[in-house]
Image (tube, grey):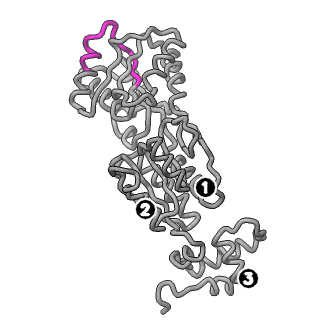
Amino acid sequence: MKRKGSVSSKDVAREAGVSQATVSYILNDVKGVKIRPETRQAVLDAIKKLNYHPNQIARGMKLKRAMSIGIVTDRNVTNFYFMKVLEGIRDGLQERNYSVNLLYNKYDSIEDAEFIKYYNSNRIDGIIFAFASVSDEEMEYMDSMGIPYVIVSTHPSGRGIGEVCTDHLNHIQNVVSYFKSKGVKNIAYAGPVPRSAKDRRLDVFKDALVSHGYDVKDELIVLGTFDNNEVCKAITSMLENSDPKPDAVLAASPRFGMLTVKSCHMLNIKIPHDIRIVAVGSSKFFDLIHPPLSSIELPLYDMGFKAAEMILKNIDEGAVEELSVLASEFIIRESS
């Protein structure tokens, strides 16, 4: 029995009936070398048949690369947004035999950051910041060092950097239009307190109300904290005491959407008969609550995959694709 890893690129070349150089060109996706489709397929078939796995350490030494990308986030690593984006990043990198390296994001100065130390010690070839705050000073430092990086965020920063985000806020207009088509008279808003000027959810909601002929009513706007009990109290108070009472709610995040559903159940408000609810964002739990929650879904996996493509292009060509905005989708379920 052959020991693990004993199959070589020479064995693949012999099986496919091509030169070892041709196998190398295909494995390394060498630019400017023309490979016939049937030749490429023969090599891929031989790789699968022989269960060949390239020696990434040797390959990295040959290419003078670590064959790994550092992933930095401010989110808990179990966070749904981060995990779905990471899944896309992983699949995008695996197509080029790159691995991921999760790195810590707490540091006193950029020079002491773990991802900078990893890059300087040739353990990663670039960095993807997935829902991580990155200051202008930090970007200037990385630019001065020639460090390839890409930022994944829900909101575009407008800073002219390599960035992947989504157009999900544009769908708030569509949600308000949908509510109006259903005869809704008063639309409430429930969401987190904005932590920066980049968070435009509430502003976009107010603009959508005005553009569709609704009045902006402060008593129908609930801004909450990280305390779920406090959020429920605020939402139930608004639902019980506001005059007029809302017959629709735009929840600015999945958590606020589910807490709005919970608050309605506590008050015996029937969804969607008495009130319609749509949440901004994605969650694996929307189909599990009753009724299933309508939402503006973010293309999280695609955002991660695109980030992987962008970082590899930056590494290969030094080319920075400044902004990629991916399309989100308004999904109507039973809550609206």
Circle 2: is it few (<14), some (14-19), or many (20+) Cα within 10 Å? Answer: some
- For the point 46% across and 43% down, the residue is 137
- For the point 63% across and 72% down, the residue is 27
Specify the amino acid type for callout 3.
Answer: Val
Q: Label 3's element?
A: loop
Q: Nearer the viewer, mark 2 or mark 1?
A: 1
Relative depth, front residue between 71 and 142? 142
Q: Give coordinates of residue 210: x percent, y percent.
A: 50, 12
- For the point 33% across and 51% down, the residue is 107
Q: Give coordinates of residue 38: x percent, y percent.
A: 76, 72
In this figure, which residue is indicated by the disc labeled 3?
Answer: 18
Asked whether the beta carbons under mark 2 and mark 1 sit within 8 Å of each other, the answer is no
Q: Is residue 158 visible?
A: yes
Relative depth, front residue between 114 and 227? 114
The magenta stretch is 236-250
Whether 263 is drawn above or below 45: the answer is above
Q: Is residue 276 left or right of residue 25?
A: left
Whether 52 is drawn above or below 146: the answer is below
Looking at marks 2 and 1 on the same chain, the residue that comes earlier in the sequence is marked by: 2
Q: Nearer the viewer, mark 1 or mark 3?
A: 1
In this figure, which residue is indicated by the disc labeled 2?
Answer: 101
Whether 117 is drawn above or below 18: the answer is above
- For the point 49% across and 45% down, the residue is 152
Residue 314 has which mark?
A: 1
